Image (spheres, grey):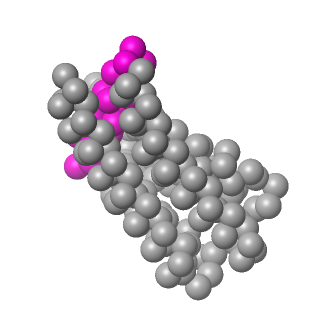
């Protein structure tokens, strides 16, 4: 069981690394809020795609297992905190650049974007899938509330 948890945590950490790399690139490679929104939209389209469904299931499954396993919770918390802290820092940078609405707490916005990404699992298990383009347009509109 310990090996399975370690392997699951390592895979989870790999997903965290990929997310951190992609989001950091979006913020620091962009020259304007329009570029940030465009690149973020492209990144989220990939993350929310049907092809990425196994990764969402994996994350949801591992988080569910952590409920009754303190050791796994501690391992995942370390990785989850790393991701949330990075996104918070990136959002604070967007606020510093005047691209993101300063009325929003960057740490709350960090959890928000992670929540709707993980929440896509609800559609993954549904018999009647929502239209991916409609989902992406909705997310784009939500992001426009965060960014100017």
> In the rendered view, would you say 83 is above or below 18?
above
Near-viewer residue (3 or 108): 3
Q: Is residue 141 visible?
A: no
Magenta: main secondary structure equals helix
Residue visible at 53% across and 78% down?
28
Image position of 63 (left or right of 146): left
Q: Quadrant of the C terminus?
A: bottom right
> In the rendered view, would you say 4 is above or below 84?
above
Image position of 23 (left or right of 92): left
Q: Can residue 4 be seen in this view?
A: yes
Which residue extends farthest bottom? 31
Bounds of the magenta segment: 51-69
Determine which quarter of the picture holds residue 9.
top left
Near-viewer residue (117 or 62): 62
> In the rendered view, would you say 95 is above or below 1?
below
Near-viewer residue (126 or 74): 74
Residue 25 in percent (x, y) is at: 45, 74
- Find out whether residue 54 is within the magenta segment: yes
Image position of 76 (left or right of 52): right
Residue 56 in percent (x, y) is at: 32, 39
Residue 32 in percent (x, y) is at: 62, 81
> In the rendered view, would you say 62 is above or below 111?
above
Which residue extends farthest top? 68
Residue visible at 46% across and 42% down?
78
Residue visible at 69% across and 54% down?
106
- Find out whether residue 53 is within the magenta segment: yes
Residue 100 in percent (x, y) is at: 71, 65
């Amino acid at each position: 069981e310990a090996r399975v948890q370690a392997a699951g945590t390592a895979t989870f950490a790999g997903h965290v690394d990929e997310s951190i790399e992609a989001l950091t690139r979006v913020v620091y490679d962009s020259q304007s809020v329009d570029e940030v929104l465009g690149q973020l939209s492209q990144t989220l389209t990939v993350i929310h795609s049907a092809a990425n469904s196994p990764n969402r299931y994996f994350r949801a499954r591992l988080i569910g297992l952590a409920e009754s396993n303190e050791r796994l919770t501690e391992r995942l918390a370390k990785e989850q905190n790393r991701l949330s802290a990075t996104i918070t820092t990136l959002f604070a940078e967007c606020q510093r650049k005047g691209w993101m609405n300063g009325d929003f707490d960057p740490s709350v916005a960090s959890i928000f974007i992670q929540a709707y990404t993980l929440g896509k699992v609800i559609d993954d298990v549904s018999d009647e899938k929502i239209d991916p383009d409609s989902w992406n347009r909705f997310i784009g509109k939500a992001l426009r509330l965060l960014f100017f």
